[in-house]
Image (cartoon, rainbow, N blue to C red):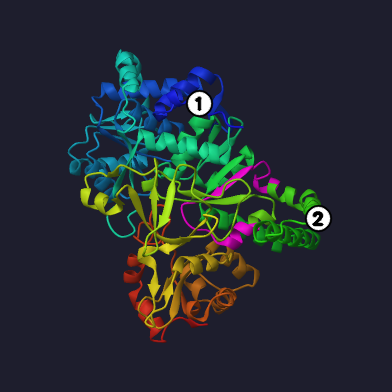
Amino acid sequence: MTAELSSDAATSAPGLLFARAARDGAATALRYKHLGLWRDVSYADYAAAVKDAGCGLLALGVAPGDRVAVIGENRREWLYTDLAVQAIGAVTVGIYTTNAAPECAYIVGHSDSVVFIVENEEQLDKALQIRAQTPTLRWIVVMDMEGLRDFSDPMVMSWDELVVRGRTAALTDEFEQLLAALDPDATALLIYTSGTTGQPKGAMLTHRNITWTGRCLTEAFDVGADEDVVSFLPLSHIAERLLSTYIALTAGYRVHFIENLDAVMQNTKEVSPTFLFSVPRIWEKYQSLILIRMRDAHWFKRLAFGAALAVGRQYAHARLDSARGVPLWLKLAFRLADLAVLRKLRERIGFERVRVAVTGAAAISPDVLRFYHAIGLPLRQIYGQTEGSGPTTCHQGDLIDPANAGPALPGIEVRIADDGEILVRGPNVFKGYFRNPEATAETVQDGWLHSGDVGEIDARGFLRITDRKKDLIITSGGKNIAPQLIENELKTSPYIADAILIGDGRNYVTALIVLDEEHVVKFAQDRKVQYTTYASLAEAREVCELILDEVRRVNNNLARVEQVKRFCILPKKLLEEDGEVTPTMKVKRRAINRQFGDTIEGMYGGKLGIAV
């Protein structure tokens, strides 16, 4: 199935690209939409664009070891930038598009980036705001000049100008020499971690780290050149970079760039991907969408879906949770349910061709994973972190257990420290944190990466992640509670977008609840609930009763000490710009506890919130 390139081409990602172009130059590598139509970019054109951009950067004075920052949504120029920078021995520094100017200033300044490549006018504004604070920055390159045709600044040039410089500078020989001389153990990427507890740290990943990991995942997922992938998660995160670039170059498949974030579902239907990776929040959203739509469907469709889903749930339980396996009668019943209902459902959302479906970047509720198996989508979980180049463990083949994240990937060792922390060793472990030897020494000890996560390994070697080490709740009675597991169960409700458990040092557990606005608004409209704003919606009696029922449902499956005794529905959504979540939508617990401190104290004083 796989179409992996030989190992002599695999010492760097740009090396993989040029080897792929030499072997399969006419094959389609990338696809993007223009004027409503999907356009193809061949591997030969991909390689030529990277060479032109690399020569352009050389013409701007970028030297091996220099850092080049890039900010933008998923598009082919992002990939060209990444590989061009690496090809000349420089280091790519990805920045989230949602980062505000001060956060951009910190990353560009801390990394001493010499060039900042930005997507459009919005991101250019940030670059212009911060350039006085970043003395090493010499050039700003804009990918999309819409709205900027009359703009002029001696420090700013368009992407097209960069490419023209590259084509006319007679630097091809220097480019090829630098590419050939790349040290596999030199830094290729700086990925700044989300920073849930402070300023982000720049994780240094080497050429060997990313190419080894790309090969490892290509083999683990058994993907090849016939796959179609949709690129929509942030390219500044290691997960999407692996999917869109490093696994793609190893396997040789096609990557499709979405038009914009609002078009993810529509573009996914158009592409009908075969290999699909996403984060739990997206899988939860699709599940909620399916269930809500079915509740509003014609009675016959509701009946047919209910019957098919019941069969699917039995099939998923037998396959995933039972040691006896799936009996023949259930296999036949599921096949019939699939032909009559479930296959059409997957077609409606663009999942009918998905062969490999993966969730990662955060833990997912086992019930959500079971739901996808019930509708015929073989979702598996992967666990890892940036410092491990992405993956550590993963469900492989047919060995999928909803309660854990599978065994270690081949070539990676995992063990549990005395205090329960997950330790990792292998070719995927990063080089260290840029300009932070203290944090590096604390994180990597005797070759073992200290993940900061707590977990356990069962007799099969499957890893179960309990929580973040720093997030564990210890009640005043001395009971240890892993909040993430309970929060994930609460988020299986279509009406709950986020849940933050509180209880450290307290005598019982409470929760802050964030509504799933789309589904709660529909609930309110269907029942003619009066509201004017999000805050008034959160206060409506019917909505409070709805969430109370959802919390009680989860409590029924929890030990008494874990049960939520009181909750508050927050009057706002959690926003990155308010410092409440990271760019990857991980909750910043310290910030939440500080910002909603009065609410939390009100719950424990019995003056605020809803008793369960």
Horizontal and vertical percent position of residue 188:
33, 34
Location of residue 577 (image quadrant): bottom left
User: Closest to the observer: 328 or 274?
Assistant: 328
**Residue beneath label 2, please?**
333
Q: Amino acid at mark 2?
A: Ala
> Dot 1: few (<14), some (14–19), or many (≥20) neighbours within 10 Å?
some
Q: Mark yes or no: residue 257 visible.
A: no
Q: For the N terminus, which image quadrant?
A: top right
Near mark 2 (Cα within 10 A), the count class, few <14, some 14-19 or many ≥20, is some
Instruction: Return the x and y of residue 354 as percentages of the image width and height.
Output: 64, 43
Q: Is residue 528 magenta?
A: no
Q: Secondary structure at mark 2?
A: helix
Q: Is residue 351 magenta?
A: yes
- What residue appears at the point 43 percent right and 28 percent down from the top-left corner? 10
Give the image location of residue 258, x and y in percent: 52, 39
**Observer able to see residue 332:** yes
Q: Position of residue 427 (x, y in %)?
A: 39, 40
Q: Amino acid at mark 1?
A: Leu
Residue ranking furthest to the front:
459
Mark 2 or mark 1, earlier in chain: 1
Indicate whether 366 appears above or below 51.
below
Give the magenta-colored segment's residue range: 347-371
Q: Find the distance from the CA under tag 2 to the CA under tag 1.
A: 42 Å
367 sits left or right of 165 in the view: right
Does residue 394 sit above or below 245 in this rendering? below
Q: Nearer the viewer, residue 433 or 32?
A: 433
Q: Which residue is mark 1?
A: 5
Task: Determine the secondary structure under disc 1.
Answer: loop
